[in-house]
């Protein structure tokens, strides 16, 4: 267990605490837990690269930790609760989860049918931008519910998430098509 993997594991362990804080409407705690997750996501990647701690376990755990935290945030913040100043639109949560599910389905198909290496499915620049925008939007929603924030900022972030989710989803599917053609 490397330091980078331990940090990723801590991020996974933080997910239930994050969810409970939202369910109990402690948006300040939820904001800081989510911010912690975002910072440690960057930190574990930096440590893995800089200190040569890249592992197969880390390559699997890191995206799982990201998706667990983001999916939890988007699902929990799409459920209306009294006292919230802003909720994530359910259609946006469905868009994001659908993109992720489609990508996983295509990866599994590619892996099982064409015995493709997982290296073919490395995150793209579009995927990284999308994840960054999704994190920024979720943080903005939590911040708005905790401390207040102009709705225009949250709205602009929401539409950037929509645009980048569609672009990155299309890009991953297109890239998957290219792998399939190369394998045949």
Image (cartoon, rainbow, N blue to C red):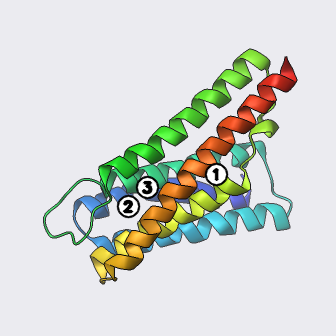
Q: Is residue 116 visible?
A: no
Q: Is residue 66 left or right of residue 72?
A: right
Residue at the outermost left position: 82
Q: Is residue 152 above or below residue 130?
A: below
Residue 45: where, in percent of width, then height?
72, 62
Element marked by disc 1: helix
Assess whether mark 1 and mark 2 are in contact (beta carbons under 8 angstroms): no
Residue assigned mark 2: 18
Image quarter where the C terminus lies is top right
**Crowd rating for badge 3 (residues with CA inside 10 Å; few <14, some 14–19, many 20+):** many
**Measuring 31% from the left and 55% from the top, which residue is drawn there?**
89
Task: State the mark number for residue 62.
Answer: 1
Residue 135: where, in percent of width, then height?
51, 64
Residue 27: where, in percent of width, then height?
30, 71
- Spatial separation of the CA atoms under disc 2 and disc 1: 17 Å
**Crowd rating for badge 1 (residues with CA inside 10 Å; few <14, some 14–19, many 20+):** many
**Crowd rating for badge 2 (residues with CA inside 10 Å; few <14, some 14–19, many 20+):** many
Q: Is residue 37 above or below residue 65?
A: below
Foreground residue, 136 or 22? 136
Element marked by disc 3: helix
**Measuring 62% from the left and 63% from the top, which residue is drawn there?**
41
């Amino acid at each position: 267990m490397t330091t980078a993997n331990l940090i990723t594991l801590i991020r996974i362990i933080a997910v239930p605490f994050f969810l409970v804080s939202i369910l109990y409407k402690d948006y300040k705690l939820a904001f800081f837990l989510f911010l912690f997750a975002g910072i440690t996501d960057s930190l574990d990647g930096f440590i893995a690269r800089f200190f040569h701690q890249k592992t197969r376990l880390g390559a699997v755990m890191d995206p799982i930790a990201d998706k667990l935290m983001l999916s939890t945030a988007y699902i929990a913040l799409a459920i209306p609760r009294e006292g919230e100043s802003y909720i994530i639109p359910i259609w946006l949560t469905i868009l994001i989860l659908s993109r992720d599910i489609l990508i996983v389905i295509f990866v599994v198909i590619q892996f099982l049918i064409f015995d493709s290496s997982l290296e073919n499915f490395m995150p793209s620049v579009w995927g990284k931008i999308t994840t960054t925008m999704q994190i920024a939007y979720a943080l903005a929603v939590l911040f708005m519910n905790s401390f207040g924030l102009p709705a225009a900022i949250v709205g602009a972030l929401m539409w950037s998430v929509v645009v980048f989710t569609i672009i990155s989803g299309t890009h991953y599917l297109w890239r998957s098509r290219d792998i399939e053609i190369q394998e045949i």
